[in-house]
Image (cartoon, grey):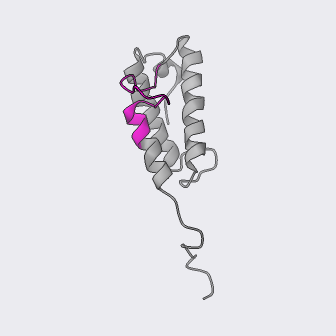
C-alpha cells in the first residue's frame, strides 16, 4: 500500500484509524493481498481487518475502537464504514458452476 510505520504513527484518533483500515480493506478486496486474489471469502477479509487492527494497536501502543458506538444490540458491530465493506463481501459470491472459463470445451 505504500504506507510506512512512520506514516501510521501519525494516525491520531480512532476515526483516522477506521478510515485507514477501510482503505486497507478495499485494497485487500481488490486483490492486493497475500494470495493475489480478488475473490476472498468474507471471513478471510474479516481476518485481514482484525489482523491490521491489532497491528495498529500494537504499533500505536493504545486501544483503537473500530466498533459502532451507536449500536445498542447484543452483538457488537463494526464501525459503519467497515461494516458496509464487510457486508459487500458477504453478498458478493459466485454460485458454484456459474462461471466457465473461455478456454473450456463445451
Picture residue at 57% right of the left edge, 76% below the top: 100
Which residue is painted at 48% across and 49% down in the image?
89
Would residue 15 be counted in the magenta stretch? no
Residue furthest top in the image: 61
Which image quadrant is residue 71 in?
Answer: top left
Considering depth in this image, is 87 or 9 the residue closer to the camera?
87
Query: Residue 9 at x, y = what percent?
Result: 48, 16
Q: How many discs appear?
A: 0
- At a point 60% along the width and 88% down the height, the residue shown is 106
Task: Decide whether residue 83 is among the magenta residues.
Answer: yes
Position of residue 80 relative to residue 37, above or below, is: above
Q: Position of residue 11 (x, y in %)?
A: 43, 18
Q: Magenta stretch?
A: 65-84
What secondary structure characterizes most of the magenta part?
Answer: loop
Image side of residue 66 versus residue 37, left or right: left
Q: Position of residue 31 (x, y in %)?
A: 53, 50
**Residue 16 image offset from top left, x and y in percent:** 39, 23
Which residue is farthest bottom? 106
On the rendered structure, is 99 left or right of 14?
Answer: right
Amino acid at each position: 500500500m505504500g504506507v510506512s510505520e512512520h506514516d501510521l504513527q501519525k494516525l491520531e484518533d480512532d476515526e483516522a484509524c477506521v478510515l485507514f483500515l477501510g482503505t486497507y480493506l478495499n485494497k485487500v478486496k481488490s486483490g492486493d493481498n497475500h494470495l493475489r486474489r480478488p475473490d476472498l471469502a468474507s471471513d478471510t477479509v474479516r481476518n485481514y481487518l482484525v489482523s491490521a487492527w491489532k497491528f495498529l494497536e500494537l504499533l500505536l501502543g493504545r486501544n483503537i475502537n473500530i466498533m459502532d458506538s451507536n449500536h445498542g444490540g447484543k452483538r457488537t458491530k463494526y464501525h459503519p464504514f467497515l461494516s458496509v465493506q464487510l457486508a459487500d463481501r458477504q453478498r458478493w459470491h459466485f454460485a458454484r458452476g456459474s462461471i466457465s472459463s473461455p478456454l473450456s470445451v463445451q
